[in-house]
Amino acid sequence: MKEVKFYVTSDISWYRDFSVKIGKALGSSITILNNTMALPKPVGDGRFEFFELEEGLGILKTYINIKDSVKFKLLPHQSNDYLILHINLRPGKSYIVDAKNNKVHIGKNWDGGIFCSSSGAPVEIILPHDEWAKSITLIIHRIWMFRHLGTTKNEFESDLSNIFFRNGCLQCSLELNIDILKIAEEIQFSSVPSEWKKVQLKGQSLKLLSYYMLAVSNYSKHKRLDYKDVMRIISLKEKMQETVNQIWPKTEVAAKQCMMSRSKFLRLFKIIYDRNYYDLYQDIRMQKAAEMLERGSSVAETSREVGFVNTSHFSKVFKDHFFIEPSLYKN
């Protein structure tokens, strides 16, 4: 099994070192371009993305498939200054080994979908070979938390986080709920023009952190949903998102593929994505179109690629969505 040993911080410095160590472990040169570390085809597929959102707050997006089994060993910091929230978005078998050498399974259901650790405690993340791993990791400095969340127990009523505030080593797993899953999925697959990405990610990350605060206070907005139902809908949406040039199947067909009734499918889809089925389809098409125009594609080429037969119709829909003509957006 390949092994990658690394530290994390909330700034970009650790990420550069991380790319070098992954490259050495996998025997391939890996570079960072625009915050993205793409895996070369000989060793796997997918990417890491890291953003320093502000001083003391960083986020790592992971969507990778490595051909060999890999053990990622997060080494302990003596200062214990960072709180690390690892949110698993993969329903297959994965596990984390904590500081007490306990094997913590993640990703099988709602239970244990969030793993919390302070940077003073070691963590091992085991990824199975040739399978997709998908996660969001927030890295938060203690000073950032003091500044934004308060410093006393009365201000911050969470026993877990007070352990961290008192500089104790913290490790635990928490239940993943639908609120956290929704915002984590948005972060993982958000596709916005590059100059907006950091602003959007910061807002989403703060929202995700607020849901974490509610989770450690045993708060739940929705009644517990069936994990398998939710993951079927998410998997279907991801599959359809890859083919935006094709019209999404009718809701009856999509519901059947998810092994549920149409009414249940539409209800769960709205809960998960806060959007109706066809509204989300249109959003994804427009996001893809904006990306293509940014990269220099013509309006006609972009129109065809996102499934429009008529360029004039595409231009109207694009303007209704972004309040600007695609030709002006391109320039």
Image (tube, rainbow, N blue to C red):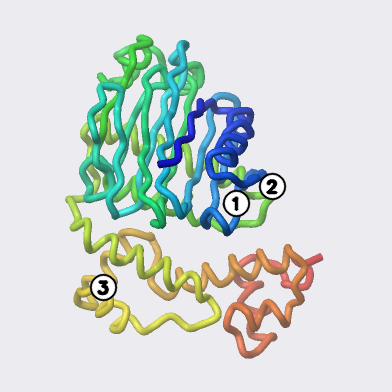
Q: Amino acid at mark 2?
A: Leu
Residue at numbered disc 1: 38
Q: Are marks 1 and 3 in contact (CB under 8 Å)?
A: no
For residue 279, the mark is none
Q: Amino acid at mark 3?
A: Cys
Q: Are marks 1 and 2 in contact (CB under 8 Å)?
A: yes
Measured as percent of width and height from the top left, residue 292 is found at 68, 68
**Which residue in the rendered view is the most extreme toward the right?**
331
Q: Amino acid at mark 1?
A: Ala
Q: Residue at x 53, y 25 (%)?
A: 9
For residue 33, the mark is 2
On screen, residue 69 versus residue 311, left or right, reads left
Q: Residue at x 71, y 67 (%)?
A: 324
From what the image shows, is residue 259 above or below residue 273? Answer: below
Separation of residues labelled 1 and 2 (CA atoms): 8 Å
Q: Nearer the viewer, residue 149 or 308?
A: 308
N-terminal label among 1 and 2: 2
From what the image shows, is residue 293 above or below residue 116? Answer: below
On screen, residue 85 versus residue 37, left or right, reads left
Q: Residue at x 52, y 57 (%)?
A: 45
Residue at numbered disc 3: 258
Q: Residues within 10 Å of mark 3 (few under 14, many from 20)?
A: some
Q: Quadrant of residue 159?
A: top left
Q: Nearer the viewer, residue 229 or 171?
A: 171
Separation of residues labelled 3 and 2 (CA atoms): 37 Å
Q: Secondary structure at mark 1?
A: strand
Separation of residues labelled 1 and 3 (CA atoms): 31 Å
